[in-house]
Amino acid sequence: MIGRLNHIGVATPSIDESVKMYRDILGATSFTEKWSMPEQGVWVCFVDLPNTQIELIEPYGEDSPIHGFLAKNPKGGQHHVCYEVDDIIAARDDMRAKGCTVLGTGEPRIGAHGVPVIFVHPKDMGGILVELMQKPEGH
Ligand code: CO
C-alpha cells in the first residue's frame, strides 16, 4: 500500500537552468546542493516545497539512463513519481505478485534520500514510471 508522495522526478538538460526557473519564476526558496550519483548516472538536486519535493535529474556520464528520455523530451519533463512504502521488499514482492515489472534486478538500490528504492515499469502504472522508496525515519 502506497503512502505519502515523496517527490516528483523531473529530467532536465541543465539543473542550473531548472533551479533558476523554480527560483526566479515560480518563487521556490529552498534547494539542496547539486550532487552526482555516478552509479545511477545522474546529477541530482531537490527543490523543497511545503508538501513535497521536486527531484531535478540531469544526465551524468555517457551511459546515463536519462539520455534517452531527453532525446525524446529535449527541454526535459516529468520523469517519475515517488511514493513512500513501509517495507520496500514487501512492496517489491507485492508488485511482482500482481504481475508488474520491477526494473533492473529488482534488488532495491540506495536512492537519492539514502534509503532503498525500486522502480516499476510505466506499462503497469498507467504510463507513469513509479519509484517506490522505503519510508525514511520520521516520516
Ligand atoms: Co526519484
Image: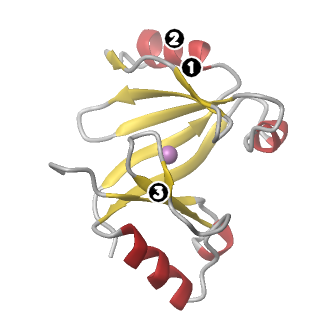
Cα–Cα gap, marks 1 and 3: 24 Å
Q: Residue furthest left?
A: 138
Name the residue rendered at 59%, 43% in the picture.
78
Near-viewer residue (102 or 26): 102
Front residue of 42/110: it is: 110
- Asked if 40 appears above or below 107 in the picture, the reply is above
Vertical arrangement, residue 8 with respect to residue 32, above or below: below
Amino acid type, callout 1: Ser
**Residue underneath mark 1:** 18
Look at discs 1 and 3 and give the one toward the viewer.
Answer: 3
Quick one: SS at disc 1? Answer: helix
Q: Could you tell me the amino acid type at mark 3?
A: Val
Residue depicted at 52% across the width and 22% down the height: 35
- Crowding near pointer 1: few (<14 within 10 Å), some, many (20+)? many
Residue 88 is situated, as x and y percent measured from the top left of the image, at 39, 68
Quadrant (top left, top right, bottom left, bottom right) of the N terminus: bottom left
Q: Which disc is residue 117 wearing?
A: 3
Q: Which residue is mark 2?
A: 20
Mark 1 C-beta to ligand 1 under 8 Å: no
Q: Three-letter amino acid code at disc 2?
A: Lys
Gap between marks 3 and 2 measured at Cα: 28 Å
Quick one: label 1 or label 3, which is nearer the N terminus? 1
Q: Residues at badges 2 and 1 in contact (C-beta under 8 Å)?
A: yes
Mark with earlier residue (3, 2): 2
Q: Mark 3 packing: few (<14 Cα in 10 Å), some, or many (20+)?
A: many
Image quadrant of residue 23? top left
Query: How far across and how far down the image is residue 124, in percent?
Result: 62, 76
